[in-house]
Image: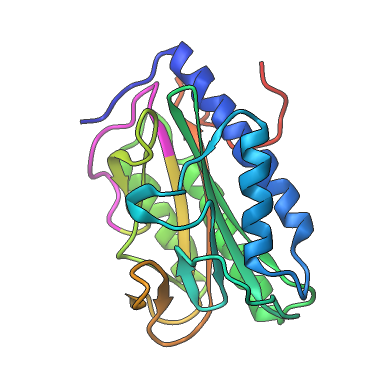
Amino acid sequence: MIILKSPEEVKKIEVACRIVAMTLDIIKKMVRPGITTREIDTFADVYIREKDAIPAFKGYRGYPASICTSVNNEVIHGIPSNRGLKEGDILGIDLGVYKDGYYGDGALTCPVGEVEPELERLLRITEEALYIGIENAKTINRVSDISHSIQKHVESNGFSVVRSFVGHGIGRDLHEDPQIPNFGPPGRGPRLREGMTLAIETMVNAGSYDVQILDDGWTVVTVDGKPSAHFEHTILVTSDEPKILTNLTKMH
């Protein structure tokens, strides 16, 4: 069941999303060769709690950390560790915040120092695809119009979209209906309606879209070992243009 949010609920989701955005913005500046993903996780945990909020992922279905840190060929759900980042790596950071009964969710992938031009292109195309998907989150469209627009941009640039994991609705629960795949034909699925809050997330592989879960039960990696990138925003469907809630603009 898709839950349309009232203006009061949207305001609460927006507060959680702003904390997501602020945390990601600081983490982006922390990423450098030598720092460990556990150090980043520790920072995020403290920072989110200082905002009187809760890291949404900690303990979610047994997840052991406050954020997900996915390096190179890790697609999503990488667990922070004492492994230091290296020059030329890429690091995906995914985090959620729970505050006053509502969730916010966002992700980005950043370069560690200087990276190969093809990795820069992977990050650029994945982020572009996210914004193209968001542009299609309008009441004239259906859910799969978001999906199709993402797939078209990614595949026309020679990359592949992950098919085993999808974006999702968000609100009182971290994962709500509808599911939002990054692939599929246009014009399918539920019609988009004003008041929907959606976590749209592009997961893009440099090689094949095939992925597998490691023995830790969480970390998703590319089967062919090629790198993967991940970007995500929580957005609101309005009567006009979609509104990105996980950004750093001043709140109304």
In the rendered image, residue 215, in percent from the top left (x then y), is placed at 34, 78
Q: Using the image, determine if residue 58 lies above or below residue 182.
A: above
> Dividing the picture into quarters, in which one does residue 229 lie?
bottom right
The residue located at (39%, 46%) in the rendering is: 146
Q: Quadrant of the N terminus?
A: top left
Please indicate, yes or no, whether residue 120 appears anywhere in the rendered image: yes
Q: Does residue 188 appear left or right of residue 111 in this picture? A: left
Using the image as rendered, state which of residue 106 and residue 98 is in the foreground. 98
> Dividing the picture into quarters, in which one does residue 247 lie?
top right
Q: Does residue 49 appear left or right of residue 171 in this picture? A: right
Using the image as rendered, state which of residue 84 and residue 242 is in the foreground. 84
The residue located at (49%, 61%) in the rendering is: 153
Q: Using the image, determine if residue 179 lies above or below residue 12.
A: below
Q: Does residue 187 show up magenta in the picture? A: yes
Q: Does residue 228 show up magenta in the picture? A: no
> Dividing the picture into quarters, in which one does residue 245 lie?
top right
Magenta portion: prevailing SS class: loop
Using the image as rendered, state which of residue 87 and residue 224 is in the foreground. 87
Using the image as rendered, state which of residue 67 and residue 187 is in the foreground. 67
Q: Does residue 77 appear left or right of residue 30 in this picture? A: left
In the rendered image, residue 7, in percent from the top left (x then y), is placed at 46, 13
Query: What range is drawn magenta here?
Result: 184-198
In the rendered image, residue 53, in percent from the top left (x then y), is placed at 57, 31
Please indicate, yes or no, whether residue 245 appears anywhere in the rendered image: no
The residue located at (56%, 34%) in the rendering is: 17
In the rendered image, residue 85, in percent from the top left (x then y), is placed at 69, 75
Q: Using the image, determine if residue 212 lies above or below residue 95.
A: below
Q: Using the image, determine if residue 31 lies above or below residue 115.
A: above
The residue located at (40%, 61%) in the rendering is: 151
Tally of numbered tags: 0
